[in-house]
């Protein structure tokens, strides 16, 4: 499996397009598509690996965990610098507030 194929599979599993992954990684929107004919830079691979929550070694095929499971990542729901997503789409702030109230023992229906 090539680097491009691994990126495609991980992206699809997370509900992201390659263009979205590239944008989140801060690289050109068509950069990943070019990896079918060009070798990506280590810097760009690291950026994409970070977006996909995997390692460069996995993307390069140096390690194989037997599947394309996504590593779990802990985040603080209060961290304003984190964009939380569900099925690849950002969770709206109002829904995050409902989630917070629910996690804190509320029903999620009670408004402030």
Image (cartoon, rainbow, N blue to C red):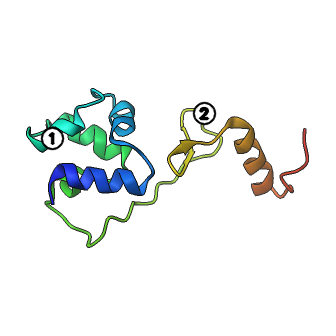
- Is disc 1 surrounded by few (<14), some (14 to 19) or many (20+) residues within 10 Å? some
Q: Nearer the viewer, residue 12 or 68?
A: 12
Q: Is residue 79 left or right of residue 31?
A: right
- Mark 1 vs 2: CB contact within 8 A: no
Residue pictured at 45% horizontal, 50% vertical: 15
Residue pictured at 13% horizontal, 60% vertical: 62
| Residue 63 higher or lower than 95, as above or below | below
Residue pictured at 60% horizontal, 33% vertical: 80
Question: What residue would you read off at disc 2?
Answer: 80
Residue pictured at 29% horizontal, 41% vertical: 48
SS under mark 2: loop
Question: What residue would you read off at disc 1?
Answer: 35
Q: Quadrant of residue 79?
A: top right
| Residue 66 higher or lower than 97, as above or below | below
Q: Is residue 23 left or right of residue 112?
A: left
Question: Can you name the residue that lies furthest to the bottom here?
Answer: 66
Q: Position of residue 92 (x, y in %)?
A: 66, 38
Q: Position of residue 35 (x, y in %)?
A: 15, 41
Mark 1 or mark 2, earlier in chain: 1
């Amino acid at each position: 499996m090539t680097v491009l194929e691994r990126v495609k599979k991980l992206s699809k599993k997370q509900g992201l397009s390659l263009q979205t992954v590239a944008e989140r990684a801060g690289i050109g929107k068509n950069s990943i598509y070019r990896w079918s004919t060009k070798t990506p830079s280590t810097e760009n691979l690291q950026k994409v690996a970070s977006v996909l929550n995997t390692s460069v070694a996995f993307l390069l095929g140096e390690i194989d965990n037997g599947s394309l499971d996504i590593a779990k990542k802990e985040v603080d729901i209060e961290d304003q610098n984190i964009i939380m997503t569900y099925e690849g789409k950002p969770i709206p702030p109002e829904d995050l507030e409902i989630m917070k109230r629910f996690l804190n023992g509320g029903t999620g229906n009670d408004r402030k």
